[in-house]
Image (tube, coloured by chain):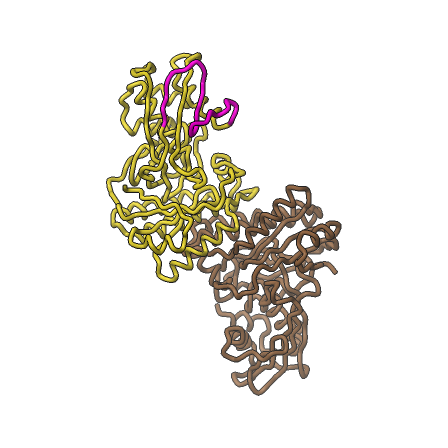
Chain colours: A yellow, B brown
Amino acid sequence: MTRKDSVEKIIGASKSPKKPSGRAFAPSNIALCKYWGKRNVELNLPVNSSLSVSLGRLGTETFISQADQDQVWLNDELVTSDAPFAQRLFRFLDLFRPADDYKFTIRTKNNIPTAAGLASSASGYAALVLALNDFWGWDLELRELSILARLGSGSASRSLFHGFVEWHRGEAVDGLDSYAEQIDVQWPDLRIAVLSVSQEKKAVGSTEGMNRTVETSALYKSWPQQAERDIKEIRQAIADQDFSKLGAVAESNALAMHATMIAADPPLLYWLPETVELFRKVWTLRNDGLPVYFTIDAGPNVKVLFEEKHETSVREYFPDAKIVIPFE
Amino acid sequence: MTRKDSVEKIIGASKSPKKPSGRAFAPSNIALCKYWGKRNVELNLPVNSSLSVSLGRLGTETFISQADQDQVWLNDELVTSDAPFAQRLFRFLDLFRPADDYKFTIRTKNNIPTAAGLASSASGYAALVLALNDFWGWDLELRELSILARLGSGSASRSLFHGFVEWHRGEAVDGLDSYAEQIDVQWPDLRIAVLSVSQEKKAVGSTEGMNRTVETSALYKSWPQQAERDIKEIRQAIADQDFSKLGAVAESNALAMHATMIAADPPLLYWLPETVELFRKVWTLRNDGLPVYFTIDAGPNVKVLFEEKHETSVREYFPDAKIVIPFE
């Protein structure tokens, strides 16, 4: 089973543009129950189901059209064709070309400050798949588009949707049951403060980090069980609009994910000294009665979950934070 | 099975002084494969076997004699009787009193800088048990004394010996097969640089930390397996005098232990920002070719393992380090 097989099953022979170009926007997302570990590396099939919240108007807008040669413009700058970013994108587009000499121009813009360290591959591959759907008039279901986006980047499967989103791990070998779905609950008061401690590119990318963890971390064996327990509790917390439960489980899920990496060989520690300082600051504020919880992805930056009524305090304690309103 | 039962089995009725006072020294120790988790809290029976290196002349010297009331002097200062340190000690002495009104004076001195954050309860309870053995002329085997020391503090079972020491977890319910033994290998070139980042008393003691981890950390389930693998490799590295293997396994074992804590609920993070800074410094130096590895116990301070030939470099990069020679 290859990525190509997945694409054939979903879009069949429908590979010709219906319009001069395609266009789409997809939001970035932050997982509250993390995706960590692939059971199939080629198809980005996850070991565990995950649950995220999309970031409203923050994300990626992408235009696609036919061209003489593959070209990708990121935030109005042409990316050199041999850059890993472009290479990965062109290989993904290989899955969709009507003929080998069919080439694309992609123009993609993130309205997320790059410094924030928010996953742009999630919104990027989601927007790209939506733009292809628009360009070629596939009229696919979001569930099918979610599978296509997953082939580009696992967490992109979740960026097809706004609000809370669950990506079902699925069981099938072909991965056709591994897609994301929206959870039909709004939470307008939810806020996320993004605290950026480093803008450097991380030394170990998340795919490599996942693979190393799965292969070498003895503690990873317990992760699927932890993730299963956590996703149930987060689902329940969302249904109950129970903020402190949502925060507590999201925080402990993120720490458990990092724990599996720390126990990898060689160890994977994405934290910087400032990361630990922010953890401690969040804990101190919480001890002092301010309901704030953090989550953290495979990088050094910290995201603080809070409710709208505490925005003044959060702004005071984290003056450099970028505050995101997921349900805007 | 209580602590009292263990004591009765080992020393029987032999509870009267043969000398006016007893005296003994026991070294501190640093575990290369950590003790983390009790399968019996009362008897300090561990989930996993552990392996340490004793710190030579750094440790605790203790004098004991009969007195009108229980009193303990720590580094020449009288400790107030209601301090947790004194309370724990007096409860331990309860196991040995010939009569309820039999009281002790204990004078105990650590020649380890308290700031170094080296476990003093290990050397403390080991020295106390040795001093009792001297005072009362028990003439017990070290193996038996190791069991008695374990009843005071788990890692004290290892501080009965110099050099490399393995504490066998044992299987028996009464814990009489859970004792430490010396490994008959010398490693005169081994050095440990103790890097102190905080002298504050830790917020969560190691017993409480262990218990919370065992009870709440899903990832702890994989720890016994990791510890079993690590202790085998460390034994082999010692037999082969393979420093880089010793260092690598010790470092990964310590990180895995911390990973189990980080995944506890609520999370247990003993690291300070400076701790992470030191981890990264060690990794950078190692990347640059200097064979240094760290280990870290349930606290923020870091211990760097290296060989004598690199002492100049280590002193240069860590000017504030206290350098320990275990085989002096």
Residue stretch rendered in magenta on the structure? A62-83
Q: Residue at x 44, y 40 (%)?
A: A117
At x 50%, y 27%, the residue is: A84
- The quadrant of the image that shows the C terminus of chain B is bottom right
In the displayed structure, does residue A328 sit left or right of residue B125?
left
Foreground of the two, B266 or A164: A164
Whole-percent x, y for residue A240 in the image: 25, 50
The reply, left or right, for residue A215 in relation to residue B193 is: left
With respect to residue A257, does A127 lie above or below?
above
**Residue A276 horizontal side relative to residue B238, left or right:** left
Query: Magenta stretch: residue B277 in it?
Result: no
Q: How many marks?
A: 0
Is residue B132 something one can see in this rendering? no
Q: Residue at x 42, y 57 (%)?
A: A283
Q: Is residue B115 above or below residue A237?
A: below
> Which of the 4 quarters of the picture holds residue B28?
bottom right
